[in-house]
Image (cartoon, rainbow, N blue to C red):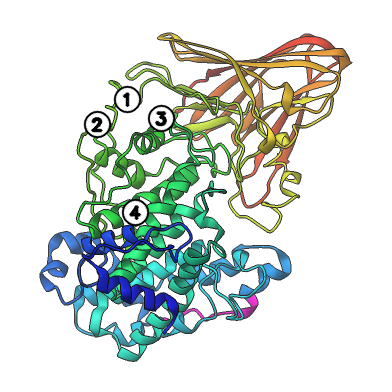
């Protein structure tokens, strides 16, 4: 028996007994807190939903409706061959640096789990059990659940040492949920080998990290708190899996205590006003899993451990609404994919839990309908308390300003003829930052028509390394920002741009940003960008850049669009997309040369990058780009 198991057994004996002060065997966790959480837990492991043996649950119309087409989907699988594991595809990333082939191979296999589990629980006739036993055996014996891109040394693939990454944590939680739901209907040998695989690949590596403070960087530490979504996603998976299958109550308590303690480091990655520097897409991914972790802890401890019980969490939850340009339309800042909406599951969950009162469609049905571990997750509201601020009247309002990040989002007033919305950002920083100081986006109705083209749809081995900003979609060439003296912006992850002025009224908003620090141009004296949003009529947005040099230098503006482009006259263009149009007028001192370059990188939708190059060098110049809605075809 390992030393960890000995300690856990000792804690089990000490439940309810005052602990003798002693050095903690865990890097940051307190044995007293683990013991206290253990006293809150049920005697047996449990996940969301009910085991297959609970026929009242599985025969209820609500459950059958919640499972959707799972039974029909599983019936189709009965006549198909299970997608094979491919060493060649898994190892492809180590050879080429391209992620999709290996990840698609894993996803094709994993997609069989949920419909087969749900179908057997719904039907309860044993028809799917032979295939389920085959598939679960395959999962237990495949080399690793870690994504190829996260197995750089191939230690996971070669079964030398397992690292819990996003893939292993999420899929491990789904496998644990399958064990809980199916219970003793599975072949005992398959159940045993899958339980052993969970221990080897999920629980043992995390216990080692909790004891040593090493080996799992996404946990973070007091000296170096992790600042990205990995923390919440991996903790949600590991804690969910522990709750579902670990028979020892003290053992389960260890993982719940880790979820409670280490998830605080993820919350440190958000500004006090809730702004997410990873962008709207990663807000949904990271904070959505934090909400899953919260609900797991809350349900397991019968309401006694609630991660949402503080004011900052409410601000983070509100970000999902405050960042929206229009209904679920968000600016694709940072690595957010173009066209990705504000996640309706996560926003609906936040709306209901915090009682924001935002009309947002149907009530929340939980999170993660593509994950078995979260399919039956309940929505548990936060009771109004003095510790949580009230939601402002009119939330989220006509505009949102995130002060620390320098991000302004402007929306038309409800019921007005204005269809124009806009957002601008001072800078991103963090692992998902682009070189996008001063980037903006302009939308008409439900269409993003000009500005930031968003982030990659697929990553490779260069995206998070020293070559990241060689990609035009990530460097400032692919963003709606100036090119100064033929120079692009410098690495924005090291910059902290300054908002020089704001002016907010009922008629509209105005913000000014100092962009000078984004360019390593010795002759540059100043570069001030101002966005003015006018709410009256059909709306109007003006981007004004005032540049000053020590001597005349070249200057150009960049403006990406995924819309069709038509030039109406020397200074006016029209963009069209999805039945919406945007008229763009460019005012420069002496006219401009228009250049167009097609950019298609990293799986993202191709866009046209328009360049407005001043006809001659300037020492002091003001350039205006004016946006107004065109004639809508909708």
Give the residues in magenta. Answer: 80-88
SS of the residue at dot 4?
A: helix
Residue 212 visible: yes
Cα separation between marks 3 and 1: 8 Å
Is 83 in the magenta? yes
Question: What mark, if any, has residue 357 been given in the picture?
Answer: 2
Q: CA distance from mark 2 to mark 3?
A: 13 Å
- Mark 4 surroundings within 10 Å by alpha-carbon count, few (fewer than 14), some (14 through 19), many (20 or more): many
SS type, badge 3: helix
Up the image or down, 173 lies above or below 350; here it is: below
Marks 3/4: CA distance? 21 Å
Horizontal and vertical percent position of residue 95: 73, 70
Nearer mark to the viewer, of 1 and 4: 4
- Disc on the earlier residue, 3 or 1: 3
- Which of the marked residues, 2 or 3, is nearer the chain's N terminus? 3
- Any part of residue 72 in sight: no
Which residue is identified by label 1?
395
Asked which secondary structure carries label 2, the reply is loop
Q: Camera-side residue: 315 or 375?
A: 315
Of callouts 3 and 4, the N-terminal one: 4
- CA distance for labels 4 and 2: 21 Å
The dot on residue 292 is 4
Q: Which residue position is annotated with label 3?
A: 322
Q: Residue at x 24, y 35 (%)?
A: 355
Q: Main secondary structure of the magenta part?
A: loop
Could you say where residue 542 lies in the image, as x and y percent from the top left? Answer: 59, 14
């Amino acid at each position: 028996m390992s030393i960890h198991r000995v300690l856990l057994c000792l804690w089990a004996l000490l439940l309810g007994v005052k602990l003798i002060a002693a050095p903690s065997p865990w890097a940051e966790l307190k044995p007293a807190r683990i013991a206290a959480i253990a006293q809150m837990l049920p005697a047996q492991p449990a996940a969301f939903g009910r085991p297959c043996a609970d026929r009242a649950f599985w025969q209820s119309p609500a459950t059958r409706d919640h499972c959707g087409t799972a039974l029909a989907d599983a019936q189709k699988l009965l006549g198909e061959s299970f997608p094979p594991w491919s060493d060649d595809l898994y190892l492809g990333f180590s050879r080429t640096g391209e992620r999709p082939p290996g990840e698609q191979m894993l996803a094709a296999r994993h997609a069989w789990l949920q419909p087969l589990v749900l179908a057997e629980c719904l039907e309860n006739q044993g028809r799917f059990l032979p295939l389920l036993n085959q598939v679960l055996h395959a999962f237990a014996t495949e080399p690793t659940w870690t994504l190829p891109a996260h197995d750089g040394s191939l230690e996971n693939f070669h079964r030398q040492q397992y690292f819990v990454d996003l893939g292993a944590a999420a899929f491990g939680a789904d496998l644990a949920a399958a064990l809980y739901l199916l219970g003793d209907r599975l072949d005992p040998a398959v159940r045993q080998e899958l339980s052993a695989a969970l221990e080897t690949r999920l629980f043992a590596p995390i216990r080692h990290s909790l004891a040593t403070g090493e080996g799992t960087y996404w946990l973070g530490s007091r000296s170096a708190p992790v600042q990205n979504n990995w923390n919440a996603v991996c903790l949600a998976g590991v804690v969910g899996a522990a709750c579902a299958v670990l028979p020892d109550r003290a053992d389960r308590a260890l993982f719940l205590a880790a979820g409670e303690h280490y998830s605080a480091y993820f919350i440190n990655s958000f500004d006090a006003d809730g702004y997410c520097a990873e962008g709207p897409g990663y807000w949904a991914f990271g904070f959505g899993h934090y909400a899953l972790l919260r609900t797991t802890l809350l349900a397991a401890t019968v309401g006694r451990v609630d991660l949402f019980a503080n004011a900052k969490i409410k601000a983070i939850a509100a970000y999902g609404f405050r960042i929206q340009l229009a209904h679920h339309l968000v600016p694709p800042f940072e690595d957010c994919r173009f066209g990705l909406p504000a996640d309706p599951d996560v926003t609906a969950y936040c709306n209901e839990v915090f009682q924001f009162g935002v009309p947002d469609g149907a009530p929340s049905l939980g999170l993660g309908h593509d994950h078995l571990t979260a399919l039956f997750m309940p929505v548990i509201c936060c009771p109004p308390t003095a510790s949580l601020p009230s939601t402002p009247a009119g939330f989220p309002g006509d505009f949102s300003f995130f002060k620390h990040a320098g991000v302004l989002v402007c929306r038309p007033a409800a019921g007005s003829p204005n269809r124009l919305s806009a957002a601008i950002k001072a800078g991103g920083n963090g692992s998902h930052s682009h070189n996008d100081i001063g980037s903006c986006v302009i939308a008409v109705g439900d269409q993003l028509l000009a500005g930031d083209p968003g982030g990659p749809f697929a990553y490779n081995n260069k995206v998070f390394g020293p070559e990241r900003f060689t990609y035009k979609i990530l460097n400032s060439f692919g963003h709606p920002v100036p090119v100064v003296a033929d120079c692009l912006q410098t690495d924005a992850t090291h910059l902290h741009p300054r908002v020089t002025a704001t002016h907010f009224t009922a008629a509209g908003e105005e913000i000014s940003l100092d962009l000078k620090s984004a360019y390593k141009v010795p002759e540059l004296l100043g570069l001030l960008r101002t966005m003015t949003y006018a709410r009256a009529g059909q709306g109007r947005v003006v981007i004004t850049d005032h540049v000053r040099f020590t001597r005349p230098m070249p200057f150009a503006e960049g403006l990406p669009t995924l819309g069709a482009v038509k030039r109406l006259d020397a200074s006016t263009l029209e963009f069209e997309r999805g039945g919406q149009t945007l008229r763009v007028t460019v005012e420069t001192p002496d006219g401009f040369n228009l250049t167009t370059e097609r950019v298609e990188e990293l799986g993202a939708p191709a866009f046209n990058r328009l360049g407005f190059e001043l006809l001659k060098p300037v020492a002091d110049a003001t350039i205006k780009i004016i946006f107004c809605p065109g004639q809508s075809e909708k």
